[in-house]
């Protein structure tokens, strides 16, 4: 391993559409009553293969074995996403000789995968890599915490799962590791910051309206790779976007304090990915960089205690700016994952970020939140929007269940290797 540090570049960034997961069609759910999502029958490996294949084709990589490593973020690596889903994707999309792993960092999984691979490039260990995210939330039982379910090896376990639903995770989690459900934490945040129901409704209305405009203007078409779903059908757009107003949202019941379902991210199916390279790889494979990774940071610091676990984003932003030698005012655009409306509102308030710079094409309330995919999706959308607006610096941050967060700053390069004053290389602290 070399002792030098090197800059890390994003050559390309793409994603699939994000479509709503299968949902019950009736109050009393049975398998035959479900309303299937548009990509529900697409195997999650195939979603990842779609993205990896597109990245290789767009980079004109004739021999795909030149990819040194692949890392795939997945929040629930179980069932169809089990047995190292990262290797399964790489084997099909690239070559059996390509090394791949699966990263689990809950909602920050694919951004953690990106951070890890960028560190390896920075320290000289590898030169060309793919950081992906994949999550299919449609298969029954797949969702946040489903990897904690007791194995179906006995009738007793199966009865517990059927009776308790999501709460069954508590049966397998260590008693000292129990966490507050995400929705409850969102409600506590809304109470702590005194966000009104109307404020949160307005945030949700704006998220969908911005996403609707972006889709109508074709902004997402530049980053979306269509997915074939069988029988000649192709999905090429996100399907969770809805236009609404205060009168319609006002009729929704509150679930967690004043927080409603409209203030929570959509559960979705999808995939996203980034092609990362060193300068040596750019030269060797004739690649043009679109952005440079300036810094990353993770945090497990939550001011206000465990009840406010989803606000570690605030400390993560402070850390990533400090590493880059930047201030909030230096950042042109922000992508703050809309796990819940109060999370974004609290983060923007405490970090002193103007909402006019945040999620300008809408966020997870409208576009969906396929858990482990969202980190790569945020960077993908951020990069394309920086290019569209001819802006330079963007920051993406996600809250992570259990009181953590992850952030990354990128600098658009417009196909040229920059010589900016924001630092000469990616920080390799992850490896220390």
Image (spheres, rainbow, N blue to C red):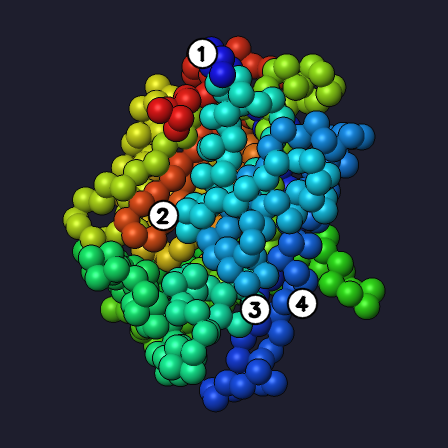
Q: Which mark is residue 399?
A: 2
Disc 2/disc 4 C-alpha distance (Å):
29 Å
Pick the front one: 328 or 277: 277
Sequence order check, earlier mark of 2 and 4: 4
Circle 4 residue: 41
Sort mark 4 into few (<14), some (14-19) or many (20+) by Cα contacts within 10 Å.
some
> Which residue was labeled with disc 3?
139
Do the residues under discs 1 and 4 have CB atoms within 8 angstroms?
no
| Disc 3 crowd, CA 10 A, few/some/many (<14, 14-19, 20+) | some
Task: For the residues labelled 3 and 2, say whether their Cβ atoms are less than 8 Å apart.
Answer: no
**Foreground mark, 1 or 2?**
1
Q: Are marks 2 and 4 in contact (CB under 8 Å)?
A: no
Whichever of labels 3 and 2 marks the residue nearer the N terminus, that label is: 3
Residue 3: which disc? 1
Marks 1/2: CA distance? Answer: 32 Å
Relative horizontal placement of residue 329, taking residue 126 as reference (left or right): left
The residue most toward the bottom is 28
Is there any visible trace of residue 331 in the rendered image?
A: no
Q: Quadrant of residue 96?
A: top right
**Which is closer to the viewer, label 1 or label 3?**
1
- Residue at 53% x, 10% y is 419
């Amino acid at each position: 391993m070399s002792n030098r540090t090197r800059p890390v570049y994003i050559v390309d960034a793409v994603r699939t559409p994000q479509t709503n997961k299968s949902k019950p069609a009736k109050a009393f759910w049975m398998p035959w009553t479900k309303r299937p999502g548009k990509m529900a029958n697409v195997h999650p490996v195939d979603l990842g293969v779609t993205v990896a294949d597109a990245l290789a084709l767009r980079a004109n990589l004739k021999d795909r074995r030149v990819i040194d490593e692949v890392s795939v973020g997945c929040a629930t690596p179980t069932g169809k996403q089990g047995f190292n889903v990262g290797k399964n994707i790489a084997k099909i999309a690239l070559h059996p000789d390509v090394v791949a792993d699966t990263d689990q960092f809950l909602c920050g999984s694919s951004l953690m995968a990106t951070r890890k691979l960028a560190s390896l490039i920075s320290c000289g260990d590898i030169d060309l890599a793919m950081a992906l995210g994949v999550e299919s939330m449609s298969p029954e039982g797949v969702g946040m915490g489903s990897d904690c379910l007791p194995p179906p090896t006995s009738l007793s376990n199966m009865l517990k799962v059927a009776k308790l639903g999501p709460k069954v995770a508590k049966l397998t989690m260590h008693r000292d590791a129990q966490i507050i459900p995400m929705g409850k934490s969102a409600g506590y945040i809304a109470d702590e910051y005194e966000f009104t129901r109307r404020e949160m409704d307005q945030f949700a209305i704006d998220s969908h309206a911005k996403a609707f405009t972006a889709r109508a203007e074709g902004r997402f078409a530049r980053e979306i790779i269509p997915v074939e779903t069988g029988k000649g059908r192709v999905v090429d757009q996100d399907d969770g976007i809805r236009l609404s107003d205060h009168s319609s949202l006002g009729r929704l019941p509150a679930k967690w304090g004043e927080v409603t379902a409209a203030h929570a991210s959509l559960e979705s199916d999808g995939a996203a990915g980034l092609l990362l390279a060193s300068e040596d790889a750019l030269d060797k494979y004739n690649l043009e960089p679109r952005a440079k990774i300036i810094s990353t940071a993770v945090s497990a610091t939550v001011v206000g205690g465990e009840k406010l676990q989803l606000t570690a984003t605030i400390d993560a932003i402070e850390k990533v700016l400090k590493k880059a030698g930047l201030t909030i005012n230096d950042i042109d655009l922000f992508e703050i994952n809309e796990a819940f409306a109060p999370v974004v509102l609290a983060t923007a308030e405490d970090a002193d970020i103007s909402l006019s710079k945040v999620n300008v094409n809408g966020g997870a309330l409208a576009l969906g939140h396929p858990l482990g995919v969202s980190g790569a999706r945020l960077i993908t959308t951020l990069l394309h929007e920086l290019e569209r607006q001819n802006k330079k610096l963007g920051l993406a941050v996600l809250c992570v269940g259990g009181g953590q967060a992850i952030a990354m700053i990128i600098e658009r390069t417009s196909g040229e290797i920059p010589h900016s004053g924001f630092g000469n290389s990616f920080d390799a602290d992850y490896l220390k």
